[in-house]
Image (cartoon, rainbow, N blue to C red):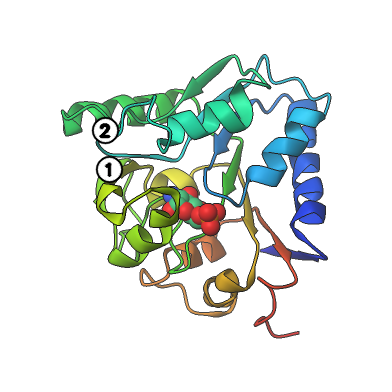
Amino acid sequence: MDIQIFENAHEASKKAVDFFEKALEKNQNVFGLATGSTPEALYEQLIDSSLDFSDAIAINLDEYYGLPANHPQSYAYFMEEHLFNAKPFKKTYIPNGENTNVSEEIDRYNTVLAENPIDLQLLGIGQNGHIGFNEPGSSSTEKTRLVDLTQETIMANSRFFSDQSEVPTQAYSMGLASIMSASQILLLAFGENKAEAIKAMIEGPVTSEVPASILQNHPNVTVLLDKEAAKLLEK
Ligand SMILES: N[C@@H]1[C@@H](O)[C@H](O)[C@@H](COP(=O)(O)O)O[C@@H]1O
């Protein structure tokens, strides 16, 4: 893993833009994208850049189960608001949270991934070390699936909903095997509340208890951190 530490999220996100630029230059046009507050600064900078994604494909990691795409807290809505409306892609994919035929939705998404191998996968990280919505205990061999969210994740995500009872308890997510099959991975983490997860991911053992630790086994991972998220790392 290549670990890079920056003064703040803005500087780290600036560096992340370079990875998108380099990928486009090499005609690596399939981007695995993430939601959450972490990539917001990156998406703002991509919008402000002259980079052209009109030939690129975006494949998102996950979506809440039960939320329609036009729900303001759905990840589909987030992506439109934070990136796609201002920076159009040729094609965008995200799990359909409204599809209650679970095996059909999983097959559809796994086919999308098989037909469009991801060149650059962007990731955030949950405070418990989850990536996508692969919670602690997730198997490293899983592809797309419907996951039960942990109480910790439901609590963390409740800040976006007016009432905790409205926070979905399940989500469709690309699995760890889907994430690991990307050619290159870029993980961003900002703020002190990510410091423990980052330490465990980088310096701890590879364990399903910290899903992100599996990234130690990937040959091409870059981690961009601000000082707070890096503060527990051994110097
Ligand atoms: N499914 C998303 C993850 O993809 C994201 O990395 C994580 C951290 O979110 P944030 O960036 O807001 O801290 O939250 C959610 O659980």
The residue sitting at 76% across, 84% down in the picture is 235
Q: In the shown orientation, is residue 5 left or right of residue 163?
A: right
Q: Which residue is mark 2?
A: 106
Three-letter amino acid code at disc 2? Ile
Q: Does residue 136 appear left or right of residue 147 in this picture? A: right
Q: Residue furthest front?
A: 162
In depth, the one of 63 and 71 nearer the eye is 71
Residue at position x 22%, y 27% from top?
Answer: 99
Most extreme residue toward the bottom is 234
Q: Residue at x 48, y 78 (%)?
A: 205
Query: Separation of disc 1 and disc 2 at Cα?
Result: 6 Å
Residue ID at (68%, 28%): 28
Indicate the quadrant where residue 151 lies: bottom left
On-image quarter of the N terminus: bottom right
Q: Are marks 1 and 2 in contact (CB under 8 Å)?
A: yes
Q: Could you say which quadrant of the image residue 110 lies in?
A: top left
- The disc at residue 145 is 1
Q: Position of residue 176 (x, y in %)?
A: 40, 52
Q: Nearer the viewer, residue 201 or 149?
A: 149
User: Compared to 198, does 161 lie above or below?
Assistant: above
